[in-house]
Image: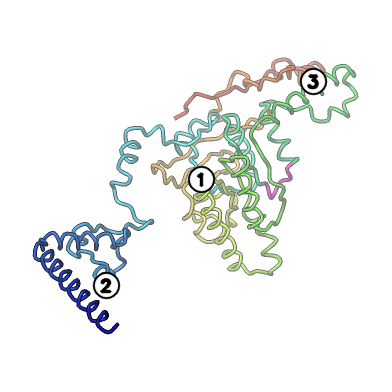
Amino acid sequence: SGRVDEDENDVESVLESDEMDQNSEIGSNIDLSSLATCTDDIVDSMRPSEPPKDANEALLTGWDLNELLEEASELPHERILKFSDLRDQVIHEIVNPEKYRGAPIPSLPGFTSLIKGFRRGEMTVLTGPTGSGKTTFLGQMSLDLAEQGINVLWGSFEIKNTRLMHKLLQQYMKDVLPVGLADNKDLPAEERQRQMAGLTALADKFETLPMHFMKFHGGSDVDDVLDAMEYAAYVHDVEHIILDNMQFMISRQANAKKASSYDKFDMQDIAVEKFRKFATEYNVHVTLVVHPRKEDEGAKLGISSFYGSAKATQEADTVIILQSDGKRKFVDVKKNRFDGTLGHVPLYFQRKSGRYTETPDVITPPKRTVIPNGVSAMNGAQKKTTSRASASSASVYHDIRNQHPI
C-alpha cells in the first residue's frame, strides 16, 4: 500500500508541472494593451451612472477629472434667469402689445386707455373721499367685466350684499327699478303683475352673470377672507376680486387688540402684503379699496393721502383715486406699472342708470339690457301715471361704448 501511495504522488506532481507549463505559455501570448483595455472596460462598468458629488468620490470611482471639468456647466438657480430664458416672450410683447393689455372697461373707454385694462396677477388700490362713488364705480366696473365672461368675486365689508346687488341690478338694467311696487296702490293689478314679471326676468338674466359674493360684513379675519378667495380661484376660476374695503375688514382685529394707530398700520401692511402675494400666486387681479386720510373737504388727494403707511401704494401695480371737489368728479390714475401712462378722465353720474359716463353731452337714451319678456313693463306704467310733461320725462342718457373722449 505504501508503494501505491508513492506512485499516486508522482502522478500528481507530473500533472501540476504540465499545468504550470501551459499557463506560462498562455501568459506569454497575452497582449498587454488588450489587457489594459479590458481593465478599463471593467472599471467603466463598475463606475456609477450618476456623476460624483465631489472630487474624492470621482477618484475613488475612477472618473477622469479633466474630462469632468470640461463637460461641467453652471448649476442653475430656480430664482435666477438670463435674457435667453425670456427672449422670445419679450420680443413677442414688443411686437404684439395689444395681446398683453388687460380686460377693458367698455363703458369707460377713456379710463381703459389710461390703464390698458386689468391684467391677471396684478393688484390695484383705489381710494376717494367718503361719498365720492367708489362702490358705484366698482359696481359698474365689475358688471363690465362679468358681461365679458370674466369671473368676478365681490368682497363687500361695508355694504351688505343685498344692498350691493340692488345697486348692481340698477346698473345692469341701465334704468330705474320699480322700487315700491308692492305699495303702489295706484297701479292696476294687471300692470303691477307685468312689472313684477319684468323684474323677475331681469333677475333671471343677472343671475347668469359669472359673479360671486363673499359672505363677510364688517370686521373679518384676513386669513378667512384669503381662504374664501382661494376657494373661488380654484372652484370658480375667478379672475378679478374686489375687496371693499380695507379699514372695515381689519376693524375687528384692531378693536380686539385695542390697537394704536401704529398697530393698525402694521395690520394693514400685513394684509396688503398677503393680498399682493395672493394675486401673484393665483394669477388673479385684486382690486383693494383703502380709505384716505382725513383731508380738508374738497382737497385734491394724492398718493400720500392713502390711510396707513406707503405699503399699499408701493405694492400696487395701479393706483386710482376718485377725485371730487363737490362740483366735478374724475378718476385719477396716479400709478401705472404696466406702461407708465398717468392722467385723469372726467366722470358724470347718471342718476337714472346709476352709472358713470365720461362725457356730459348725452342726448339719446341708453341701450337697456335686453330681457326675454321685455322690461318696458317695469317703467311703461310709471310713465303713464306720472304727471311730468313728456319733454321732461324723455330720457337724456345714452351708451357711450366705443367712443373715446380724449
Q: Quadrant of the C terminus?
A: top left
First along the sequence among labels 3 and 1: 1
Q: Amino acid at mark 2?
A: Asn
Q: Amino acid at mark 3?
A: Gln
- How far across and how far down the image is residue 189, in percent? 90, 19
Locate residue 83 relative to residue 150 in the image: left or right: left
Q: Which residues are magenta?
A: 156-161
**Cβ–Cβ below 8 Å for labels 2 and 3?**
no
- How far across and how far down the image is residue 171, in percent? 66, 31
First along the sequence among labels 2 and 3: 2
- Camera-nearest label, 2 or 1: 2
- How far across and how far down the image is residue 330, in percent? 53, 39
Disc 2 to disc 3, C-alpha distance: 93 Å
Residue under label 3, please give it: 382
Disc 3 to disc 1, C-alpha distance: 47 Å
**Cβ–Cβ below 8 Å for labels 2 and 1?**
no
- Camera-nearest label, 3 or 1: 1
Residue closest to the eye, 79 or 253: 79
Residue under label 2, please give it: 56
In the rendered view, tell whether residue 178 sits above or below residue 141. above
Q: Residues within 10 Å of mark 2 (few under 14, many from 20)?
A: few
Question: What secondary structure is marked by label 3?
Answer: helix
- How far across and how far down the image is residue 221, in percent? 67, 58
- Camera-nearest label, 2 or 3: 2
Give the number of callouts: 3
Residue closest to the eye, 313 or 302: 313
At x 65%, y 43%, the residue is 154
In the rendered image, which quarter is residue 88 located in?
Answer: top left
* Dot label at residue 283: 1
Residue 311 in the magenta stretch? The answer is no
Q: Quadrant of the N terminus?
A: bottom left
Q: Amino acid at mark 1?
A: Asn
